[in-house]
Amino acid sequence: MAWPAESTWGDKERPRGGMLILTRKSGEIIRIGDAVTVRVLEIRGNQVRLGVEAPGDVRIYREEVYRAIQKEQDESAPSDARPPAGVPKTGKP
């Protein structure tokens, strides 16, 4: 997938698993596909307040909440349903 010329990647192909790095000012917006909008609401010191608009079926979590949910699901799954250590949940190595 090629990224638009205004992205950090320019007209180069995005590396697999790479991260697109953007710089935004307060009030500016990032679009993710057609359905998700991320707006920089405020920058105060080392904290950035973001507003996310997305369809209701798109789940949005802070990373620490997402990890807690995953841990809880892993612990509640029967041991034979859990993948061996080091194997992703998808079953792909």
Image: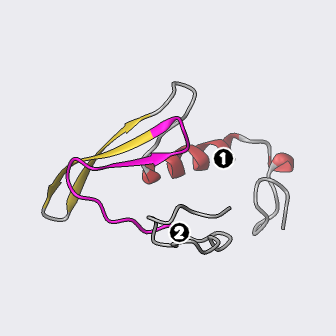
Q: CA distance from mark 1 to mark 2?
A: 30 Å
Quadrant including the C terminus = bottom right
User: From what the image shows, is residue 53 above or below residue 5?
Assistant: above
* Residue 82 lies in the magenta stretch: no
Return the residue nearer the eye: 43 or 70.
Answer: 43
Return the residue nearer the eye: 57 or 65.
Answer: 57
Span of residues in magenta: 19-36
Q: Residue at x 65, y 72 (%)?
A: 13
Q: Which mark is residue 75?
A: 1
| Label 1 vs 2, first from the N-terminus | 2
Compared across the picture, whether 48 is left or right of 73 comes to left
For label 2, the residue is 19
Compared across the picture, whether 53 is left or right of 9 comes to left
Q: Which image quadrant is residue 38 in?
A: top left
Please tell me whether mark 1 sits on a helix, a strand or a loop: helix
Amino acid type assigned to the residue bearing label 1 in the image: Glu
Is most of the magenta stretch helix, strand or loop? loop
Q: Residue at x 68, y 40 (%)?
A: 76
Compared across the picture, whether 80 is left or right of 3 comes to right
Return the residue nearer the eye: 8 or 66.
Answer: 8
Give coordinates of residue 57: x percent, y percent: 57, 27
